[in-house]
Image (cartoon, helix red, strand yellow):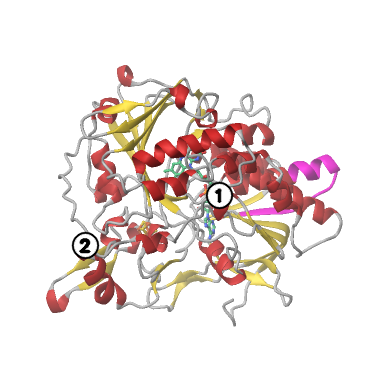
Amino acid sequence: MSEGVERETMDFDVVIVGAGPAGLAAAIRLKQLAAEAGKDVSVVVLEKGSEVGAHILSGAVIDAVGLDKLIPDWREQGSPLKTEVSEDRFYYLWKTGGIRVPNIFMPPLMSNHGCYIGSLGSLCRWLGEQAEQAGVEIYPGIAVTEAIFGANGAIEGVITGDKGIARDGSHKDSYTPGIALRGKYTLIAEGARGSLSKQLINKLGLDSESGPQKFGIGLKELWEVPADRHRPGLVQHTMGWPLDDKTGGGSFLYHFGERLVSVGFVVHLDYANPYLNPFKEFQRAKTHPLIRTHLEGGKRIAYGARALTEGGWQAIPQLAFPGGALIGCAAGFMNVPRIKGSHNAMLSGMMAAEAAFAAIETGRAGDVLEAYPASVEASDMAKELRKVRNVKPLWSRLGTAAGVMFGGIDMWLNTVFPFLPHTLKHKKADYAGLSKASGARPIEYEKPDGKLTFDILSSVFLSGTNHEEDQPVHLRLTDPSIPIERNLPEYAEPAQRYCPALVYEVVGEGETVRFQINAQNCVHCKTCDVKDPAQNITWVPPEGGDGPNYVNM
Ligand SMILES: Cc1cc2nc3c(=O)[nH]c(=O)nc-3n(C[C@H](O)[C@H](O)[C@H](O)COP(=O)(O)OP(=O)(O)OC[C@H]3O[C@@H](n4cnc5c(N)ncnc54)[C@H](O)[C@@H]3O)c2cc1C
Ligand code: SF4
């Protein structure tokens, strides 16, 4: 903890970091339990986005199982989820065509029927309102930077980032130190690759038995399309082209709302070729006849990117530790083959809330919420994640075509015989999968046409990203010499390509070559923190309220 700074302190029963589906579901559930018991429980939710939903980016086809449990009458209460899935298509693509996998071959758990298409950001805004009406205190524009540890090693709350520090470290006139929020329990709901979660996982060794987490980068655009192209309720997923067989990922395309189409692309971050550019692969994917036909004549209205967890059941770290717990995608409850995590984020948040409430009721504080991992273990969520646990390892080992086939067979086997014991482990962390540039094939990408395909900077503009420029750079290099001295000769410095916001550039030539960090463009996706081959980049939160301002994402 930063010493010598006088901080305001606030005390709560439960402190929650992150107003995504996990954090908000936990907050609402705590208040529900308190109301049922005729008690009060004080709950605060801290969110780094300028408002709830501003940093939420998802598909999203939402399995309503979490929402049904949390707010059973959510349909009548005016939730923004309105479009029910009516058609569900999955294609394996090659450059000019593709083959549709008949729905009958897909394991039942892969079906999207009964799910809803919408914006997870809008759903979170609505959940935020429900939470506030129940008495939860939500503070947006506040980034959490550190945990507070007590003398016995238990987490006792968090510290929020200072505001008004200049790039050179001096205090500006606007300087205000962060505050300390103390809680009997602290729930970490930062989503994929949270910065505080990473600190806690490392410090407390929470992943010592689970092995490495796996990640993907998801890029998304929101389009408004002509009425005659709009098919509300249509869900389409693809794998294959434009990625080669060794590179995992694929596209998603969802029609919903008033002439809206969410189109996006996921690249698994264990890709090997350092010349691969996920943003440009996404642009290329949109030129496929099976995708472009949905967008032509339409207008792109939003863009963004965010990492997602892909390790599944076997990569879930220890969930509870003295005084706190990881919930949602901070723990990694994402079902990768379904590309769905929001329902499990909510369910895990509710389970942690139930454990915390029961503990507080009996006068406990700061101990391990053992009831939370126990309920996860016994839950339907665990059954769902166990069924698909081998799919991602099979994709990584066999490549896309064979991986999709054998992954499908494995899901069927695990559906019919749910007690099959075999679990394939993830072999290595994503950054360790990058090949040296000397043995890799440079990839040629076509220039964007400005109608269907776009450049990065005009895309970042649509994310509404904004950062106070005079503040310390929030992409921290452990060793500033590594990008040019090691990453450039060995990997052609892949940060120039994997970052979906052109934050990293290698500029100049020969003696004057240098690594430039355009931190103001950062859309907080966390990909650099995952993929840098030297693990030399640490993403830390910039000033609260900075970053993207996503609407309807
Ligand atoms: C491209 C893409 C497509 C997806 N498609 C689907 C889909 O169709 N269906 C589906 O169910 N799931 C989908 N997912 C997954 C889904 O979005 C996640 O599972 C879900 O958002 C996880 O919820 P969460 O609350 O754990 O984290 P998040 O939704 O990531 O929310 C975390 C919140 O915490 C805040 N935060 C983080 N760190 C801090 C900090 N230090 N201080 C303060 N605030 C902080 C963030 O700003 C954010 O608001 C998709 C994900 C991606 C990236
Ligand atoms: S700098 Fe890192 S976190 Fe920010 S947009 Fe680029 S890859 Fe994502």
Q: Is residue 43 magenta?
A: yes
Residue at 31 percent of width and 27 percent of height? 99
Q: Quadrant of residue 359?
A: bottom right
Labels 2 and 1: the sequence-earlier one: 1
Label 1 belongs to which residue?
423
Name the one closer to the observer, 266 or 182.
Answer: 266
Q: Is 394 left, or right, of 242 in this rendering?
A: right
Residue at 25 percent of width and 70 percent of height? 490
Q: Is residue 54 magenta?
A: no
Q: Is 482 left, or right, of 87 in this rendering?
A: left
Residue at 32 percent of width and 44 percent of height? 462
SS at mark 2 in the image:
helix
Q: Which quarter of the figure is the N terminus placed in? A: bottom right
Q: Amino acid at mark 1?
A: Thr
Residue 128 visible here: no
Q: Is residue 450 above or below residue 89?
A: below
What residue span does the magenta drawing correspond to? 31-45
Label 2 belongs to which residue?
439
Q: Which quarter of the figure is the C terminus placed in? A: top left
Q: CA distance from mark 2 to mark 1?
A: 32 Å
Question: Is disc 1 surrounded by few (<14), some (14 to 19) or many (20+) residues within 10 Å?
Answer: some
**Residue 175: horizontal and vertical position, in percent?**
49, 71
**Where on the image, by quarter, is ligand 2?**
bottom left
Q: Is residue 288 above or below residue 372?
A: above
**Residue 96: horizontal and vertical position, in percent?**
20, 30
